Every structure is written in structure tokens, then in C-alpha cells.
Amino acid sequence: MTPGAAMSIPSRNFPVPTSFGPRRGAGPDGSSCSRRAWLGRFSTGLAGVALADLLHRDGLLAGPEAAPRGARPMPHHPPRAKRVIQIFLFGGLSHLESFDYKPLLDKYHGQSMPAEMRVESFDAPSIGLVQRGHFPFRRRGESGQWMSDLFPHIAERADELTFIRSMVSSSGDHGPAAFEAHTGFEISGYPAAGCWVSYGLGSENDNLPAFIVFPDSRGLPATGGNNWSNGFLPARHQGILFHAEGAPVRDLRAPAPSPPETRAARLDLLRQLNQRHLESRRHDDLFASRIESYELAARMQRTIPEAVDLSRETEATHRLYGLDNDVSRTFGRTCLTARRLVERGVRFVQIWSGGNIGRRDTWDGHLHVRTNHLENAAIIDRPVAGLLRDLRQRGLLEDTLLIFNTEFGRMPFTQALPGKYSDGRDHNKNGFSVWLAGAGLKPGHSYGATDDFGYAAVDRPVTPHDFHATLLHLLGLDHTRLTYYHSGTEQRLTNVFGNVLHDLLA
């Protein structure tokens, strides 16, 4: 058995033949052969070895430590976190305008980058002159973390944040960089981190999905659902799309109400028909997952209305999340709903800030980074700070991992655009900042650093594989053991790389 086999949960029972040979109950030579004897002989032969390998490849063979069908998998080690809320800023938040203070930019403002820096840009002709940060930086809280005025409310929670100031990406293009940030690979078709968490731990609540995604209300990202796809994992682990405004799940409710006894009879008949159909298609994971999704949807019809009913929250809580402000209301509703969902057992909630590339509603500040970032920060600042405070006062932050990240940063120089004035910045994959909170991390702590211009990570660079390895570790999962057999190899979120950042742990 491979290390990851213990995590495989068989979804079917493989039919075992009851005879071998010319007649029922007879061996190849016609002699009597019981089912037990046949199994004993077969399992010790080459055919048995081959069958076991094929069953494992199809995900139909579980190891001795695997949980029975219906049971939740166990973590590899005691977890620090039980759940995750990820806030992803699509488009590329500028670390130089937010969390990475570089006073040398003031000194060199309006000059060319020093020749010894040997800078490279995503769009080489766009390399302009050094540009100072657009927002004042100050030391925040007792920890003295440098943060700008871009996020004034989040800055008030500085002592609860754990910064990684040396993130790197393999790509300077939005699509591949976003894929890598979520799946560990630069191309589509791989499972997102939330899918791996669902696969590794299951859901704490059978009436709610394990992995829920809230897109930006202004639109889906350019790379779309590939960022929360299950990839080659069983389909039941894919991210389920929710919405902050209107019906949280499209087409969840029946078009017309029916008497409870009629509804129960319909569901019972449908269950019988599905089971009969499934028994003739034991290897069809997509069909089995479709059945499970419909069954989950039926349970969600009862649980979702209560879970997303924000009228049950106090007016003080509404204000905390910025629901009293037109600019932050929608994102605030999303963050408050996320808190209610993780309280009810959802493992992984992902919240997107930033819609489609090429419009102002992303963090892609090519032309006017100051205006772009001010507009987008006003939407999320109060809600994110409110979420942090609310998780803390409810005792949830201790075992909830809150992530605030982006696909890459921005360059320390102005982006030169022919015929246009620009105070924007181009993409920078070489070094940027993200933060985390809760889950037994060191609060008010910084890890790694970029150079004096904020161009590249020079102290303990952190790859997406390292980031994912640490995420799984906090949830009690060993990233080298959480595997799934696909395309001839044991696949994992971290490919063949990744190191847990133990220095972040309290």
C-alpha cells in the first residue's frame, strides 16, 4: 500500500466472484472449492496481486487504517485548526502599498532602478522609474508591525496577524499564478486546496458542503471555476458556489411547495431508482457523486435558510461587519455568512475579492494603483477586520485559520505605458506579502523579507507549495501522505515539493 492509501475511502463494494471454473462451487479441475478457499488461493497468487493493484488505482481498495464508508477520515496528527476561511484578492495586491514598508523607495523616487538589481518585468518595455508607496506606513499595535493606511481597520488588529513577507510565484500571469495559489500547479485541471481538505477530512456537518466558495458579487474571476475545481479527485469534493445577495444557492428551492408526505415518497422512490441504477455502474464516480450532490441539496433545503439568515444577528454585529455602509455591505454579508457557516461545520470557506481582469473591480493596478486599491480596500477593510474580531470574541479564532492572500505583488517602479500617464505598477512574482491569523500561529509575527526595493524575496522565500504544506499541517494533515492515485502516480497538493513553515507556529 502507498502512504496515501490510508486516506482513500472506498465508495463501492467490489463484487467478489462466488465460483471459479466450469460449474458453481467447483475449482478449475472440477473439485469442490468454497468461496473462502477460492479467496485464499487467489489472494496469494499473481492474479491477486494484480487485482489488488487495479483496485487501488481505481480507489476501490482501502488500507487497514481507512475509515468505513460514511465515517469521517482522521487527521494524521493533532490539528491546530478545524476549519479555514480564505480571503483571496484577485488581480495582485501591491505589497508596497499595504504590508511591506520600503523607505528606500522614497530616496530613489523618480530615478531608474540601480543597474545591479537586474530587474525583469512581466512586460519588459513597461519598466519605468522608481515609485514611492502611495500610502503612509506606521508601526501598528504592541508588535510594531509595519502596515500602511490602506487598510486602517485591519491595521487595528495587527497584533493578531502573522505575516509572510517573502511569498513568491512561478508565474507573472494572472491565470497561472491564481491556479498555483489555489491548486499548486500553473495549469488547470488540478484540485484546489479546499478540495484536498474536503478529501482529507470530510465535512463536520453532513447537511452542508465541506468546501464553499463566494465569488465577488461583481463577477467571476477570469479563470473561473477551475480555481475551486475538484480536478481528478472524486466530484463530491468540488467547491460549491454560494452568493451573498439573493438566493445563496441557485435553484436550491423547489419551484412549488408540496405536502411533506408527498415529498418524502418522491425522495424515497428516487433513492430506490438511483440505487438500482448505481448497482449496475459500480465504477461510475461521476454518477455516484451526482446522487450524493442531490441528496446533499435536499438536506441543504432544510439547513441553508437558517445558516444564512443574518436577521438572527444583532445590530451591533451588522455594524461590526460594515453592513451599515453601502460600499462594504455586500462583502460584509459574505464575511458574516462565512462565520455562520464555519460555526455549523463547513471545513473551508473561500471568499473572492476581485472579479474579471480588465475592469476596475480587481486589484490589478496597472494604470492608477492608488485609485484602484482605495476603491477595492474600502469594500473589504471593515468586513475583514470585523470577521477577525468576531472570530476572536466567539472563541473561534483559536481553531480557525484565516488566510488573506493574493496571486502576486506589484513592481517597485512605475509601469511605463506609451502615450499614457501612469502611477500604476506591473505584476511582480518575485516577492510579495500575505497574512494569516488564528490556528496556533505566532500573532504579531513576520516571516521572511524582500530586498530594500521590495522587488524580490531574499530572506526565506516561500513558495505556494510551502504555503500549502503549512496549511495542511495546521489542519492535522501531512502533505506527503495526503495523496490520490491519478495518471500513473500518487498525486498531492504540493506535487513533490513543499516544506512546513514551523517558525510560524506558536
Image (cartoon, rainbow, N blue to C red):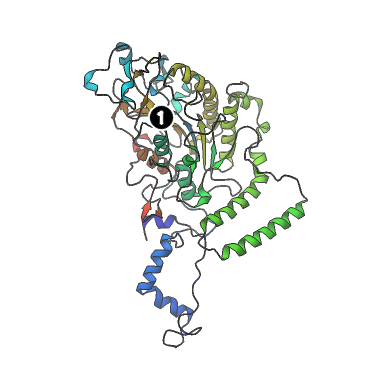
Observer-nearest residue: 30 or 203?
30
The residue singled out by tag 1 in the image is: 434
**Residue 439 vs residue 259: left or right?**
left
Circle 1 crowding by C-alpha within 10 Å: few under 14, some 14–19, many from 20: many
Instruction: Please state which amino acid type lies under the numbered disc 1.
Output: Val
- Expressed as whole percent of the image width and height from the top left, the position of residue 423 reads 40, 15
Tell me what residue is drawn at x 61 percent, y 62 percent.
275
Tell me what residue is drawn at x 54 percent, y 45 percent.
210
- Expressed as whole percent of the image width and height from the top left, the position of residue 167 reads 35, 31
**Residue 138 vs residue 87: left or right?**
left
Tell me what residue is drawn at x 44 percent, y 79 percent.
38
Observer-nearest residue: 419 or 325?
419
Residue found at the very far left of the displayed protein: 116
**Residue 228 vs residue 504: left or right?**
right
Q: Is residue 74 above or below residue 159?
A: below
- Let me know if residue 255 appears in the view: yes
Quadrant that contains the N terminus? bottom left
What SS does tag 1 mark?
A: strand
- Expressed as whole percent of the image width and height from the top left, the position of residue 419 reads 39, 14
- Expressed as whole percent of the image width and height from the top left, the position of residue 31 reads 44, 88
Q: Quadrant of residue 255?
A: top right
- Let me know if residue 148 appears in the view: no
Q: Is residue 347 above or below residue 336?
A: below
Q: Quadrant of residue 391?
A: top right
Quadrant that contains the C terminus? top left
Q: Is residue 203 above or below residue 103?
A: below
**Residue 366 vs residue 335: left or right?**
left
Residue found at the very far front of the displayed protein: 419
Total labels drawn:
1
